[in-house]
Amino acid sequence: MRVALQILGFALALSGGFAQTAPEKVAPLSSATAEDLARGKRLYDSQCSQCHGPKGDGGTGANLAQPSLRLATTDEALVRIIREGIPGTDMPATPAMTEHEWWLTAAYVRTLGKIPPEKIAGDPERGKLIFTGKGGCTACHSIHGRGGRFGPELGDIGARRSASHLRQSVLAPDADFTERYAFVRARLASGETLSGIRLNEDTFSIQFMDASERIHSFWKKDLAQLEILRNYSPMPPYAGRLSATELDDLVAYLVSLRGSK
Ligand code: HEC
Ligand code: HEC
């Protein structure tokens, strides 16, 4: 993807229509007019709201309705993130948008932060005890490197996903499977079946990790059958296994995980 974008940028630079390197300075986003913001909102609604939520308070994408953002700390950084995405995450680049459209969208995103933050009902300290105790979450998830590796590291999950997505992820993991994860089921020539979370895949090969954290690597041509499931999670659903208060506490704990140790 990155390579493809660089080639695209290069081709456009040759044709003279594209500034390859970002303009170091952008016009202050606070100078946007009401009309700019209305255009920014239309762009946001069509390109961003499916992940960041119609009000910006997040979904599979980060909560943008906050007074300050973790990565998009300056106007320039915000425009750059919208343009280039965040490599290695679900946040995509937007090569089809123009420079002015990046700016308009960024200006609108800044207004989302003026909305008061989402209120979280639970108690993060009690939630932590559920995470390490009754919930059994550490069997599969690590926080800052400590814990299981089968599920994703969650040390900064509160900064990357909204509270509503986190709640949904715990209640019904199948229903909230994001593009980032895929479940692999492979049948070998011997008839043996292996499954796990996809780590890497290209045209010819696939790598995945099974529930006992063993990594398997195959040439696709050597497999009798290969299924990539996008709506199946190996994480157990917790609906009905935690009380409403326990769930609130657990979500409050997940929201509090913002990357600092
Ligand atoms: C396919 C889902 C998806 C789409 C579409 C998407 N984003 Fe994102 N975005 C994400 C995710 C996931 C993250 C968090 C990445 C991370 O740090 O792990 C993110 C992060 C961000 C951040 C950084 C937030 C911070 O804390 O600094 C900004 C800003 C942002 N997105 C803006 C946008 C805008 C504006 C659009 C539309 C042009 C957009 N995104 C489209 C998924 C998406
Ligand atoms: C059997 C292993 C396993 C257990 C136990 C488990 N998870 Fe997961 N979890 C996973 C896997 C694998 C994924 C990635 C696929 C998916 O999204 O479901 C995941 C995904 C998640 C996500 C979504 C991450 C994202 O990037 O959006 C959250 C949040 C989460 N788990 C929290 C929890 C919590 C809280 C518990 C305990 C109550 C828990 N998990 C127990 C394996 C597990």
Image: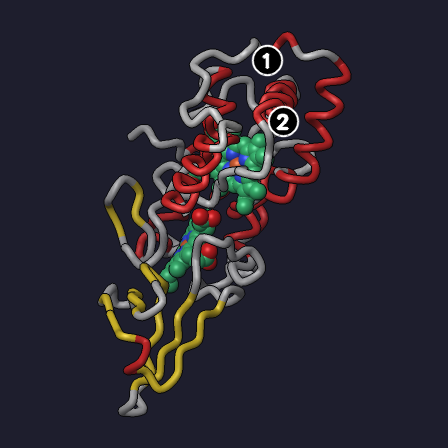
Q: In this view, does 220 lie above or below 125?
A: below
Q: Is residue 190 above or below residue 50?
A: below
Task: Using the image, tell me which numbered label, if any, was put on residue 159.
Answer: none
Q: Residue 29 carries which label?
A: 1
Which residue position holds label 2?
A: 101
Name the side, left or right, on which 127 lies relative to 231: left
Is 37 on the left-hand or right-hand side of 56? right
Locate residue 171: give its quadrant.
bottom right
Q: Provide the secondary structure element on which disc 1 rests.
A: helix
**Where residue 223 appears, x then y in whole percent?**
32, 82
Q: Position of residue 230 (x, y in %)?
A: 50, 64
Q: Farthest residue in the front direction?
A: 15
**Is residue 147 something that shows in the picture?**
yes
Which amino acid does the dot numbered 1 rest on?
Leu
Residue 193 place in picture, x, y as percent: 33, 83
Q: How far apart are marks 1 and 2 (CA)?
A: 12 Å
Outermost residue, bottom direction?
190
Viewer-proximal residue, 143 or 159? Answer: 159
Image check: 150 left or right of 104? left
Q: Which of 87 and 114 is in front in this view?
A: 87
Please identify the quadrant where the C terminus is shown: top left
Q: Of marks 1 and 2, which one's residue comes earlier in the chain?
A: 1
User: Disc 2 residue type?
Assistant: Glu
Q: Position of residue 220 (x, y in %)?
A: 32, 76
Q: Which residue is drawn at 40% across and 42% down?
A: 7
